[in-house]
Amino acid sequence: MRYSKIFTRSSKQFPKEEVSISSQLLIKGGFIDKVAAGIYTLLPFGLSVANKISQIIRDEMIKAGGQEVSMPGLIPKENWVATGRWSDLDVLFKTSGQDKKEYALGASHEEIVSPLAKKFTFSYKDLPFAIFQIQNKFRNELRAKSGILRTREFLMKDLYSFHADEADLDKYYDQMIDHYWRIFERVGIKDKTYLVYASGGTFSKFSHEFQTTTEAGEDEIYVCKKCSAGLNKEILQEAFKCPCCESVDYEVKKVIEVGNIFKIKTKYSEPFSLDFVDKDDKRQPVIMGCYGIGIQRLMGAVVEVSHDEKGIVWPQSIAPFKVYLIATPENKDEAEKLYKELIDKDIEVLYDDREVGIGEKFTDADLIGSPYRIVMSPRNNGKIELKRRSQQEPKILEKEELLKILS
Amino acid sequence: MRYSKIFTRSSKQFPKEEVSISSQLLIKGGFIDKVAAGIYTLLPFGLSVANKISQIIRDEMIKAGGQEVSMPGLIPKENWVATGRWSDLDVLFKTSGQDKKEYALGASHEEIVSPLAKKFTFSYKDLPFAIFQIQNKFRNELRAKSGILRTREFLMKDLYSFHADEADLDKYYDQMIDHYWRIFERVGIKDKTYLVYASGGTFSKFSHEFQTTTEAGEDEIYVCKKCSAGLNKEILQEAFKCPCCESVDYEVKKVIEVGNIFKIKTKYSEPFSLDFVDKDDKRQPVIMGCYGIGIQRLMGAVVEVSHDEKGIVWPQSIAPFKVYLIATPENKDEAEKLYKELIDKDIEVLYDDREVGIGEKFTDADLIGSPYRIVMSPRNNGKIELKRRSQQEPKILEKEELLKILS
């Protein structure tokens, strides 16, 4: 893509009102635009990153047997009343129709997925199955001060699994933990992420959060020095001993949550009479699990973990472009040629063909954070400079070598 | 995909409460699920169709120079107040935050896209450009009785173009008409679709609607017998003569709207001071166009146009599966083998491996409407039966011939 054709551009101003470094860098780099507190537009670069993250998650959810749907954001009041959340869930945005019918916007979708599953669940032979979507969630947060880490509207992958018994849920839950690790590995933050014991509410002993350590983390977790399991504060106060290995020796780490999984069991199946006939011809409630990941939050977490003083350092898997191409005016023709060759090889490239100074181009290359920067300049005597964003020193290469590395 | 693994199934009951045949067939076939009046979930088959339609539209919008973004559904009150639509637009769903801030859900996105464009538009050199998204719209309809043809929440592609002068808008508008024709051709309804003159509001003489003829059409248009231009009722009453060729001889046709395009000029740029410095160093308001297509409505329109008494007849471009595969118990092993061969060739196939009678499989094949049905049965003496959904007579083929036709 030619930068001159893109309607956005990086900002020279520093968005001081943003508290989190991830939102500052994403706004400065032209990935997102702030509409209001907790409400952002995904601009072309940001949408590209969000789509790549979504595709990695979708791929893992399909491997986990998930079937994709798209549920509505407008959810009728009666569905929320059935579960008690019309009055209990304080983050609901409520609205009403011209016909006086009341709705709340989907802060979560148990109230839609449970009656949906009921329509297709009759006997134990219909179980287990799993339904997921990647759709907007709306949360009426009292404060929204963490930039894209906590917003009032965001894309979320939510998967719901349906089982005949708890043993089957337990097995699926453990498989899902593996898929979550695989997702965090693919977006480049696995090494800094912990599986953390959290409260299971009234239905389960524990739920689990995936928490990624960053200096600017909004939460604290207690990491067991013996087994590396994490505990959140609530669990530490209740249990004191590590639920995994019974050690009592912890290290405190600042974190942001990047995923959570929950055995909700019959909490949402019972209100909707989501049940099935078991092998003994007895009616039983369906046992459920739910598994969430916020897309923009994960994008923000990656930036929190992977940036330097000059800008973002994207992992290749979710970078908007693999290559940022810069050329001096003397090398313009060669750059045009290389640009076309890269496109022919399906290498995603942002060609900075704007009429701005070369210094600005270098600054933007670092800010936007593509994994590779190419510079074509007379200084290189016909060769081409290739620098990894994560490294200091460039290499001077023949074009063939360069194309080999990038392919 | 194996039908036995899909959590949905077709319904034997006829959804009588649905008025439109498209919604009846889409519910019966397991494409969509009705949550409430005007609110539907896209189930796996329906999401697949919606994604294919979206991808065709995205492809044409990118060819038209569109840059994709994703704007929020929650739009602050002040944006709507700026354009007067907080009080004038009766289809707004309004809500408020815990912090008492008020919002309306995006029924349209001029109030977000105009201030966004302002951030990146300074001089005539920044123009023209075009921004689009495929995102949920929310419309507080008083009545929602046409099934998925008119809903309270739906995916919409909306593109907004930004120009330095009206001549440039006019040129782009005509190009967009070509892209719209290409979209309707690709989804198989071009032959039944008319470009219709409609009211341009206070800012333009005309806007245009794309209207597709169907027996169950909710609107009527007047088609000029001389030049095939369409007029809606309002324009007929005002103009009487055909705006295209001045003829006065019309034919009345029942239609549903599948797209509309509008020269909104400075209606939304002025309230947000979206202006630019022209070549003579003078400040001018940006001239805008907007161009919409509802995804679910287009899906419904295709079904209205393309079905028979047995079910849907999908055009191949947007069918959830190209092939529906049925086998008798005697041919199960052969069917498993063919299923794998089709997958290896990237041919989308729904293999009906459910433990149900063969009659039910035939019924579902016609209802779901994949372009091809394969039957493997001892009756065919080692050959395979291939039938197009749109034709009556099957062909009996050797496997090699069959794979050649499907590839």
Image (tube, coloured by chain):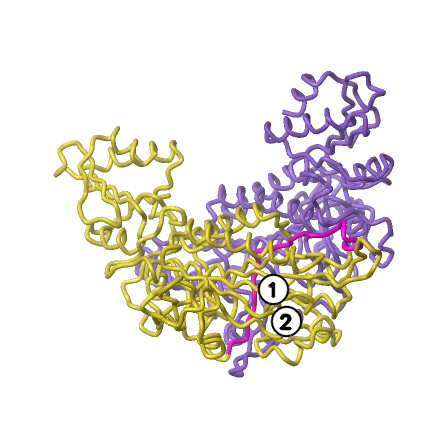
Chain colours: A purple, B yellow
Percent position of residue B73, x then y: 63, 64
Task: Find residue B9 and report its image quarter.
Answer: bottom left
Percent position of residue A256, x then y: 74, 51
Considering the image in quadrants, where does the N terminus of chain A appear? top right
User: Which residue ends up furthest to the bottom in the rendered image?
Assistant: A100
Residue on which disc 2 sits: B203
Percent position of residue A361, x then y: 82, 37
What numbered label is drawn on residue B292? none
Front one among A241 and B173: B173
Q: Give the structural element (helix, strand or loop) at label 1.
A: strand
Q: Give the structural element (helix, strand or loop) at label 2.
A: loop
**Looking at the image, can residue B129 be seen?**
yes
Instruction: Report if residue B129 lies within the magenta region.
Output: yes
- Asked if the residue under mark 1 is in contact with the one under mark 2, i.e. CB atoms within 8 Å, the reply is yes
Picture residue at 70% right of the left edge, 18% below the top: A399
In-image side of A291 versus A237 (left or right):
left
Task: Find residue A333 and report its image quarter.
Answer: top right
Mark 2 falls within which chain? B
In-image side of A118 versus A32 (left or right):
left
Percent position of residue A85, x then y: 58, 72
Measure the C-alpha gap from mark 2 to mark 1. 8 Å
Mark 1 falls within which chain? B
Front one among B224 and B288: B224
Amino acid type of the residue tagged 2 in the rendering: Phe
Residue on which disc 1 sits: B263
Q: Which contiguous range is marked in magenta? A: B120-141
User: Which residue ends up furthest to the front in the rendered image?
Assistant: B246
**Looking at the image, can residue B98 be seen?**
no
Amino acid type of the residue tagged 1 in the rendering: Lys
Callout 1: 10 Å neighbours few (<14), some, many (20+)?
A: many
Front one among B185 and A245: B185
